[in-house]
Structure formats: structure tokens, C-alpha cells
């Protein structure tokens, strides 16, 4: 029987992508540099992950960290990254582009959506950095993207459930609305119940120590000092627990979601 919800796990390594699949995830979002919120992964990583997992693989296309307002050269890089991901067997592309005023850059979003076809596209949490979520939803729909990933405009999705419920209602099945941003096994049931989303995006990462025995603590290779001797990994058991709680939430919370959604629409 088809699962009532879809679980996407964010991964930045072959090991984490495999763990996501082993834990029961339906899709992997593959990124590089998760400390910056995710950027485009290398072609080598895309190829290695694609050859080792059988579930859907969506590739982040983000040329750098920071804001989502891109220059001409950066946009050209994004075009090439879309084509590379297609060539390497990705099932979908994840990206987001904003104008300087905080609105969705519809023309360039539509261009990447068309360039990616027949692959599906997700407009990522750049959406949450836009100036008007309801207006941005319509703009993303016009662009042709298949889904939007959002926390309801808040840092943590737990604080954005009312806005998220309204977005689900306003989407009217014209686009999938996927919840993300701080989803855990402890809160996933309530998020599903309160919003009516059918797709969830989570990281479920744990810090694992480096196997390095020799350590030069005086030197740091990045802005976040001390990261050289720890790794961030996905564990199958955490994915499994999250999925179990999500499925229970989707099934047990079904009668209440419509009521919650209507209440949220009235009170926002």
C-alpha cells in the first residue's frame, strides 16, 4: 500500500544517502556544504550516490552560500549544474531564485524548470526568505515548479504551522507543499496533523567523531572552528523512527487536519 506521506532526507555524502534509503526514506536531497545551508554537490558525489541508491535523488543547485539573488555568471553556473545533474541520472532539481525586492524571480525560475524537464523541480526554502509567502506561492506555481519547500516563513517549522496550513489550502493541489525546517521524530506527528502537508523534508543528522588520531587543534580550515574533527551523518534508525511517527501522524491525524486548516485560514 502506498505510504500516505513522502519523506525526503537531506544528505551530503554517500554514507548518509545510503542510510536514508535503509531507514525507509522515499527521496534524498543531495547537497554540498550543509554548514551553509546546502550548495550544489560535486559531479563525483552525484554520480557515486546515484550508483548506490535506488530511491529518488534530487540535487541541490545553489552556486554559493548567502542570499538567493544571483548574477548573470552565477545563473549560467546554475544552468550548467542542472544539465550535469540530468546527465548523471538525478530524478529532480532543487533551487530557488529571488529578486532584490524579495519576490520570486519568475522568468529565471521558469527557465530552469523548463531546462530541467522531464525532471521535477522543487523551489527550496529561498521561499521562506521572500517578502510575501502567499504572493510567492502563486509565483512559484506560475513558474511551473512541482513543489515548494517551506517552514511557513519561520526559522523552525513548528513556529510556522499556521502559515503552512494556509499555504496548503491556497495551493489547492496545484503544487505540492513540502514542510521542512527542524522536523524531528518528536514533532512530525503534530506538524502533519496541524498543516495537512503530505511531504516532509528532514535532516536527522548526528555528529560523529573523526577517526583522526593526530589532531592539530591550532588550525581551523573554515569559519566554524573545530569542525575538522567531527562529521555529520544520517543514521538509518533515526530515519526509521521519524518515518514511523510520520505515518502514525498522517493516519491518526487525518480527521483533524481539515478543521485545523480552515481555522488557520480564518485566523491568519
Image (spheres, grey):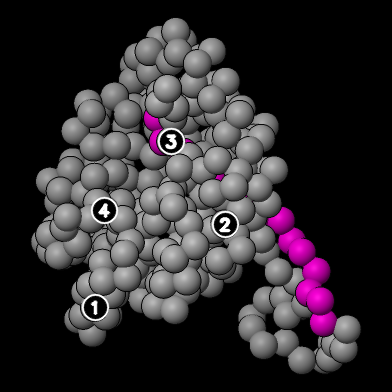
Mark positioned earlier in the residue sequence (4 or 2): 2
Mark positioned earlier in the residue sequence (3 or 2): 3
Per the image, is 198 magenta? yes
Disc 3 designates what residue? 6
Mark positioned earlier in the residue sequence (1 or 3): 3
Disc 2 designates what residue? 18
* Residue contact at pointers 1 and 4, CB within 8 angstroms: no
Magenta-highlighted residues: 197-212
User: Looking at the image, is mark 3 or mark 4 nearer the viewer?
Assistant: 3
Circle 1 Cα neighbour tier, 10 Å, few/some/many (<14 / 14–19 / ≥20) = some
Q: Quadrant of residue 217?
A: bottom right
Disc 4 designates what residue? 121
Disc 1 designates what residue? 80
Q: Up-down: is 261 above or below 234?
A: above
Separation of marks 1 and 4 at Cα, in angstroms: 15 Å
Q: Up-down: is 177 above or below 116?
A: above
Per the image, is 199 magenta? yes
Amino acid at each position: 500500500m502506498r505510504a500516505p506521506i513522502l519523506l525526503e532526507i537531506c544528505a551530503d555524502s554517500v554514507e548518509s544517502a545510503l542510510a536514508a534509503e535503509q531507514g525507509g526514506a522515499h527521496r534524498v536531497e543531495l547537497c554540498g556544504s550543509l554548514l551553509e545551508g546546502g550548495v550544489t554537490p560535486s559531479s563525483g558525489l552525484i554520480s557515486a550516490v546515484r550508483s548506490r541508491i535506488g530511491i529518488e535523488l534530487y540535487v541541490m543547485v545553489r552556486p554559493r552560500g548567502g542570499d538567493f539573488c544571483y548574477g548573470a555568471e552565477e545563473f549560467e553556473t546554475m544552468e550548467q549544474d542542472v544539465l550535469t545533474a540530468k546527465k548523471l541520472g538525478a530524478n529532480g532539481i532543487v533551487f530557488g531564485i529571488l529578486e532584490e525586492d524579495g519576490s520570486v524571480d519568475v522568468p529565471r525560475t521558469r527557465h530552469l524548470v523548463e531546462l530541467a524537464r522531464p525532471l521535477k523541480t522543487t523551489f527550496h526554502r529561498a521561499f521562506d526568505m521572500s517578502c510575501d509567502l502567499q504572493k510567492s506561492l502563486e509565483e512559484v506555481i506560475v513558474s511551473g515548479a512541482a513543489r515548494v519547500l517551506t517552514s511557513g516563513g519561520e526559522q523552525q517549522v513548528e513556529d510556522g504551522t499556521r502559515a503552512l496550513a494556509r499555504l496548503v489550502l491556497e495551493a489547492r493541489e496545484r503544487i505540492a507543499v513540502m514542510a521542512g525546517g527542524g522536523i524531528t521524530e518528536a514533532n512530525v506527528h503534530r506538524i502533519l496533523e496541524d498543516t495537512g502537508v503530505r511531504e516532509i523534508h528532514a535532516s536527522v543528522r548526528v555528529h560523529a567523531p573523526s577517526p583522526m588520531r593526530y589532531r592539530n587543534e591550532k588550525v581551523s580550515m573554515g569559519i566554524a572552528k573545530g569542525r575538522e574533527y567531527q562529521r555529520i551523518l544520517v543514521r538509518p534508525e533515526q530515519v526509521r523512527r521519524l518515518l514511523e511517527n510520520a505515518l502514525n501522524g498522517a493516519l491518526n491525524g487525518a480527521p483533524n487536519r481539515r478543521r485545523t486548516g480552515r481555522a488557520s485560514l480564518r485566523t491568519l
